Amino acid sequence: MQKRPLYSRSGKARAEARSPWIASDGITPVYIAGAGETASPTLRERARLWADTAYTRHRGKALVGACALVCLVIVGGYALLWPPPRALTQGRLNQAVNFALDHRPEQPSVSTLAYAQIIPSVVRIDGYDPMMPNESGSPDDRSHPNDPNAPLEGNSALPGYKNVSVGGGVVIDDKGSVLTAMHVAVSAKRLRVIFADGTQANATIAAADKQDDMAQLKPDKIPDDLQPATLSSTRGLRPGDEVEAVGFPFGIGPSVSAGVVSGLKREFEGGGKTRLSNLIQFDAAANPGNSGGPLVDRHGEVIGIVDAIVNPSGARTFAGIGFAVPIENAMRGTFGESPL
């Protein structure tokens, strides 16, 4: 009896039977009808074919769109959950302003700013007289008692000299000219000027005016970073305006004291029977050692030179009344005319 031949099916045929879709161009799937099937795909198969084709061709755009959609959902949800802004009322505005004012950084005072402006121009003036043979001092201290060109040594004394006076002054030009009171300039045989940076120099009287008790000193050397003071007119000065006196009261300093203008055009007769007129009266504390120092306004500009104090008891201490020569008078007396 003749047997029917048996043929085995290849794996390729089984694979094609399992997947009726093949890619003709490597991208777009094409439906291949199987045995007993019609060539036309069903509606479900067409939908699947369209979805596969669209995703394959637009996969990048689809991912971007999906990410954008997720972001929009997150932002929208955050906006919906964020509490609505509170209405700005006058009470809340006042509360915010008061909070800002209470917590703002503390500003420096007027006196602080004025002092910082004038202090680089303030100098100390020490007066020295030669020591006598019977006065204390080593032989080295008396080696050159009468030599005006002897070198300056030490911080507070000159060899062979004794300190007899102290006062203040102010630098008024880039040549180092120092404006001070005349009674400070003539108080000793020899004068030493100490600038704000510590530079020390011998000084001589370049000009003087007894009528206004003003003098101009010329130092024999000046600092490299010399800073002259700014001079201001007293034309608009009024009683009650803030002023500061800078000097070396009792040799202590530089020191600053604050006050106001107490009056204008005052007159004062000093111990030498010299009557000073057109003076500025002020109540900023001043004592011996303040003479010759500057009286400045709230901007640190020089409006006068401190010249005298009044104490009814006769003591040489401050009792609430000080006098300063207006800067116009001071400059006129030492330079021949007022430049202001």
Image (tube, rainbow, N blue to C red):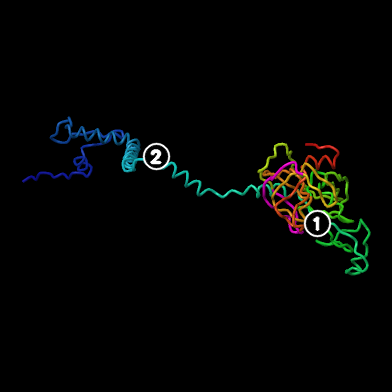
**Mark 1 is on which residue type?**
Val
Disc marking residue 320: none
Q: Residue at x 22, y 42 (%)?
A: 15
Determine whether, in the image, residue 18 is placed left or right of residue 90: left
Residue 34 picture location, percent across and down: 17, 36
Q: Quadrant of the C terminus?
A: top right
Residues shaded magenta: 244-266
Q: Which label's residue is closer to the chain start, 1 or 2?
A: 2
Determine whether, in the image, residue 26 is placed left or right of residue 296: left
**Mark 2 is on which residue type?**
Thr
Which of 111/313 is in front?
A: 313
- Mark 1 or mark 2: which is in front? 1
Say which residue label 1 marks: 166
Which of 313/276 is in front?
A: 313
Residue 339 picture location, percent across and down: 80, 36
Say which residue label 2 marks: 89
Which of 177/260 is in front?
A: 260
Which of 192/163 is in front?
A: 163
Q: How many marks?
A: 2
Q: Main secondary structure of the magenta part?
A: strand
Residue 234 picture location, percent across and down: 73, 39
